Image (cartoon, helix red, strand yellow):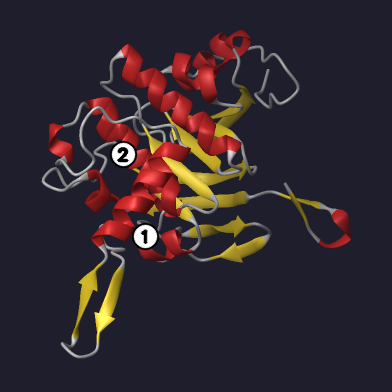
Amino acid sequence: MSQGAGGQHVSLLEVRGATKHFGAVLALDRVDLRLEAGEVLALLGDNGAGKSTLIKALSGVHKLDAGQIVLAGEEVVIKSPAEARAAGIETVYQDLALFDNLSATENFFAGREMSKFNWLRGFAFVRDRQMEREATNLLDSLEVKLRIDKRSAVGLMSGGQRQAVAVARAAAFASRIVILDEPTAALGVRETRNVLELIKKLAGRGIGVILISHNLEDVTAVADRAMVLRQGKFIGEAEATGANHEALVGMIVGASRYAVAGRSGTAPQ
């Protein structure tokens, strides 16, 4: 939590009036979002609700037609994934974007390889040992245990281990926000539990987490708050608790009435 001028609270991230068209289709219709440091915010909604469009705007894949993105009190324009990463925003998509033929360490530093330029020979050497030490230290700090040598190809790892590598890679470079798109999809019970524990550790380090998930049990296990989109519009939000399970489902499917428990609910009655 930070403060602006005059001691006013400044959220880690604010999206104001996000609007995006794809031809005649209105994918986002003046959507607002707020995320605090160390908070896990679940972003819920059926397919086509606008979730992916919103996170792709935050990660630099799409440019909003209208609206503002305010990061730590300053308005930013994110034109590319590289600019999002430079701003401290890392995204883990459902396909993980891992290179199956590379090791966990090589995947960690893909596109960010540590190197030392050799002035005599005119080219740079990759610092393999330093990268391996840093990857090992990060995995250890997040208590990620791989049951396979970190130098082995990630294609040989289980789904949960691959997911952990992708999330840990995001954590390695995210100074502010990690966005996770269905991080437990197709995982077993134990692997799901490990990934959810990793999400909690990210929040414990003060990183804001945006979690897209269709699994409300996972959401209530790790999220502080849940907001719902439907057909590109913000429908409402509520504390991510078991008591609000029915209300969240009602928002997702478009029920006419749903009662929200807790103080954070903003759903219409």
x, y (%) of residue 41?
56, 33
Amino acid at dot 2? Val
State which tag comes first along the sequence, 1 or 2: 1
Name the amino acid, label 1: Pro
* Count of numbered circles on the image: 2
Q: Residues within 10 Å of mark 2 (few under 14, many from 20)?
A: many
Residue located 39% across and 40% down the image: 139
Q: Nearer the viewer, mark 1 or mark 2?
A: 2
Question: Can the viewer see residue 135 in this picture?
Answer: yes
Q: Quadrant of the C terminus?
A: top right
10 Å neighbourhood of mark 1: few (<14), some, or many (≥20)? some
Q: Is residue 226 left or right of residue 147?
A: right
Q: Which residue is mark 1?
A: 81
Tell which residue pokes out farthest to the bottom in this image: 120
Q: Residue 236 at x, y = what percent? A: 60, 28
Residue 102 falls left or right of residue 10: left
Q: Secondary structure at mark 2?
A: helix
Helix, strand or loop under label 1: helix
Q: Residue at x 47, y 44 (%)?
A: 178
Q: Are marks 1 and 2 in contact (CB under 8 Å)?
A: no
* Residue that carries the numbered disc 2 in the rendered image: 165
80 and 149: which is toward the camera: 149
x, y (%) of residue 167?
37, 39
Disc 1/disc 2 C-alpha distance (Å)? 19 Å
Residue at image position (13%, 37%) is: 155
| Nearer-the-camera pick, 267 or 178 | 178
* Residue 23 drawn above or below residue 198: below
Q: Which residue ends up furthest to the left in the rendered image? A: 101
Residue 53's quadrant in the figure?
top left
Q: Is residue 195 left or right of residue 29?
A: left
Q: Is residue 24 visible?
A: no
Residue at image position (34%, 34%) is 164
